[in-house]
Image (cartoon, helix red, strand yellow):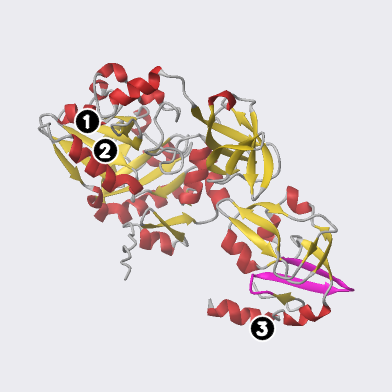
Amino acid sequence: MTLPTDRKYTTEHEWLHEEGGEATVGITEHAQQLLGDVVFVDLPAAGKVFSKGEVFGSVESVKAVSDLYAPISGEISTSNTVLAEQPQLVNSDCYGEAWMVKIKPSKTGELVELLDANAYQKLLSST
Amino acid sequence: MTVEAKILRTPLFALQQARGGRFVPFAGWEMAVQFAGVVAEHMAVRSAVGLFDVSHMGEIVLEGPQAAAAVQHLITQDVSKLLDNRALYTVMCSEAGGIVDDLIVYREHPERFFLCVNASRCSDDFAHMQAHTKAFDCSVTDVSAAWAQVALQGPLAQTMISGICRHNSADMKPFSWVDTQVGGIDVRLARTGYTGEHGFELYCQSNDAEALFLALEKAGEPHKLGLCGLGARDTLRLEMKYPLYGNDIDLAHNPFEAGLGWVVKLQKGAFVGSKALQAIKAAPLARQWIGFKMMGRGIARPGYPITAEGRVIGSVTSGTHSPSLGEAIGCGYVPTRLAQPGMAFDIMIRDKPVPAQVVATPFYKSR
């Protein structure tokens, strides 16, 4: 799968798409493949505040639990409640339907620190 | 300086790698944990048929004029009732009544027994068996390297194998076994399994493993045979509440509290651990191994604390999301007063208490 170029990436295999002062966050194809069948997604309530790098939730496959790290600092404006009923969407549509949270960024400077598609691709090739 | 043990590979490693298997270390072996995906593989076994490489398991042979007496001395089950070409499930205990391993004993004839033990316990089992059979005219030999093993499990397993099996596999009762040919390859075909479905475990010489695997793959094509890894093996056995050594049973637990009192035949006479087990059986059990369902959002995992009224009362020994039930299930030891279906407690999932309730087991009932 080619990496969507309309968004940024993190070294923790998450993607972030910023538009109109709101950032949508999910996990990448690489991450969902590593996880295997996703059976449970734990996401924070709206209003919760996180600093960049803080654990904001978790994704569970049959065999393992993986933490989700806030790619930027900010407040959760909404979590994707569909994933509570259909966690398998993370495997089938990680860049679309399986977005996880929308964050209101509190530090605009952090967005430039994220990787673009090329840099993330380079990271994947080196692992 | 650290000396690292070299990780072992079964004779089926290359073939499984070529089929896209994803590998993880398990008990010193590099094993396939999944192919198409744990859930898909699990459902394939429940609805059709799945094929597992279980060549990592250990095999030990006891042979000699007093082999039957030696086996009787080692295991808790009564082997005197076991006939040729039949097998039984049992545990072996320490002098203190703790569980050394759970295993299957196959009787070839009165002076030769073939034991299948857990991969993680094979060398400890061998040492235990040698130590406790010195007084018997019987040899104990670890033959694990010579044998490979695969499991063929699911409602279509028998149909699938019938075309390529010399023996009439439709005739075989559970826990019966026979030396025959499958796909032209010499196998020990046993009607045993760790999934709760109809099926077989096939033992063959290590050199024949690839040929056997390919023959089974070919025969399985019209029946939508799925290659399965250890991930699905775990979810399948957990739905049946079959114990996994190291998680659910170990030297620190006795068979009675583990719910395995049915394999302890104290009336057969003395055996290793029988004195301790007599005393344990005579007293009320302090704790019991139960199955539970999560009543709130969260998946219980091995090691997570079990709490009641704010106090830790046990820990989860096995837990997962059950593909067949679509719910999170688990097992653990809890005080006897909480060991009845309907009793409630919490599972600590990363510092958050999530409610759970004891349920009747097995969690899943095969059709």
**A25 left or right, relative to B131:** right
Residue underneath mark 1:
B71
Type of residue at label 3? Asn
**Mark 3 falls on what kind of element?**
helix
- Category of crowding for the residue at label 1, using alpha-carbon neighbours closer than 10 angstroms: few (below 14), some (14–19), many (at least 20): many
In the rendered image, the vertical position of residue A68 relative to residue A123, given as above or below: above
Give me the residue at 75% from left, 61% from top. Answer: A100
Q: Is residue B248 visible?
A: yes
Does the segment drawn in magenta span residue A15? Answer: yes
Give me the residue at 35% from left, 29% from top. Answer: B172
Q: Chain under label 1? A: B
Q: Mark 1 and mark 2 in contact (Cβ < 8 Å)? A: yes
Foreground residue, B146 or B28? B28
Foreground residue, A13 or A91? A13
Give me the residue at 59% from left, 63% from top. Answer: A33
Counting residues from the N terminus, which is met first, the one under dot 2 or under dot 1?
Answer: 1
The residue lying furthest to the right in this view is A20
Residue underneath mark 2:
B115
Q: Chain under label 3? A: A
Q: Nearer the viewer, mark 1 or mark 3?
A: 1
Foreground residue, B305 or B90? B305
Q: Chain under label 2? A: B
Type of residue at label 1? Val
Q: Is the stretch drawn in magenta largely helix, strand or loop?
A: strand
Residue A24, given in percent of the width and then of the height, sits at 80, 67
Pointers 2 and 1 within a single chain: yes
- Category of crowding for the residue at label 2, using alpha-carbon neighbours closer than 10 angstroms: few (below 14), some (14–19), many (at least 20): many
**B72 left or right, relative to B276:** left
Task: Specify the segment rendered in magenta.
Answer: A10-26
Quadrant, the N terminus of chain A: bottom right
- The CA span between labels 3 and 2 is 56 Å
